[in-house]
Image (cartoon, grey):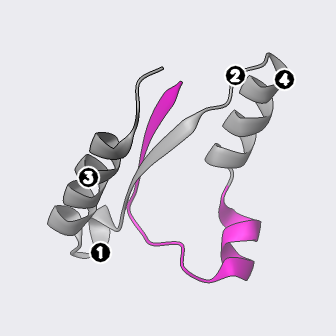
């Protein structure tokens, strides 16, 4: 399963990521419960002037995925 996520901000500080990131943690747990390991494509920083870089990074990541 491939999950595409976008965020307005950028989660850089590891302590903040652990406290503030909920989507990936929840989706990994819930799909793992039924035997699915999701892969994530992220576009972070959309609202912080990093739109183009975020979208280009997400497209590069999508190109790196290998279909099963």
Q: CA distance from mark 4 to mark 1?
A: 35 Å
Task: Describe the element under mark 1 as helix, strand or loop.
Answer: helix
Q: CA distance from mark 2 to mark 4?
A: 7 Å
Q: Nearer the viewer, mark 1 or mark 3?
A: 3
What's the magenta region?
Answer: 1-21
The 10 Å Cα crowd at callout 4, few under 14, some 14 to 19, many 20 or more, is few
Q: CA distance from mark 4 to mark 3?
A: 29 Å
Q: Residue furthest top?
A: 34
User: Residue beneath label 3, please?
Assistant: 60
The 10 Å Cα crowd at callout 3, few under 14, some 14 to 19, many 20 or more, is few
Disc on the earlier residue, 4 or 1: 4
Q: CA distance from mark 2 to mark 1?
A: 33 Å
Identity of the residue drawn at 69% across and 22% down = 36
Residue 49 locus on image (x, y percent)? 21, 75
User: Residue beneath label 4, please?
Assistant: 33
Residue 52 locus on image (x, y percent)? 15, 64
Q: Nearer the viewer, mark 4 or mark 1?
A: 4
User: Residue beneath label 1, please?
Assistant: 48
Residue 7 sits inside the magenta stretch: yes
Q: Which of the two residues, 21 or 57, is positioned nearer the viewer here? A: 57
Vertical arrangement, residue 7 with respect to residue 36, above or below: below
Residue 16 locus on image (x, y percent)? 68, 77
The answer to whether mark 1 and mark 3 are in CB contact below 8 A is no
The answer to whether mark 2 and mark 1 are in CB contact below 8 A is no
The answer to whether mark 4 and mark 1 are in CB contact below 8 A is no
Q: Which of the two residues, 35 or 64, is positioned nearer the viewer here? A: 64
Q: Which of the two residues, 54 or 39, is positioned nearer the viewer here? A: 39
User: Residue beneath label 2, please?
Assistant: 36
């Amino acid at each position: 399963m491939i999950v595409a996520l976008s965020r307005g901000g950028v989660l850089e500080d590891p302590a903040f990521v652990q406290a503030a990131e909920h989507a990936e943690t929840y989706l990994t747990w819930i799909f793992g419960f039924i035997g699915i390991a999701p892969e994530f494509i992220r576009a972070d920083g959309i609202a912080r002037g990093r739109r183009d870089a975020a979208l280009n990074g997400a497209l590069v990541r999508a190109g790196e995925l290998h279909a099963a």
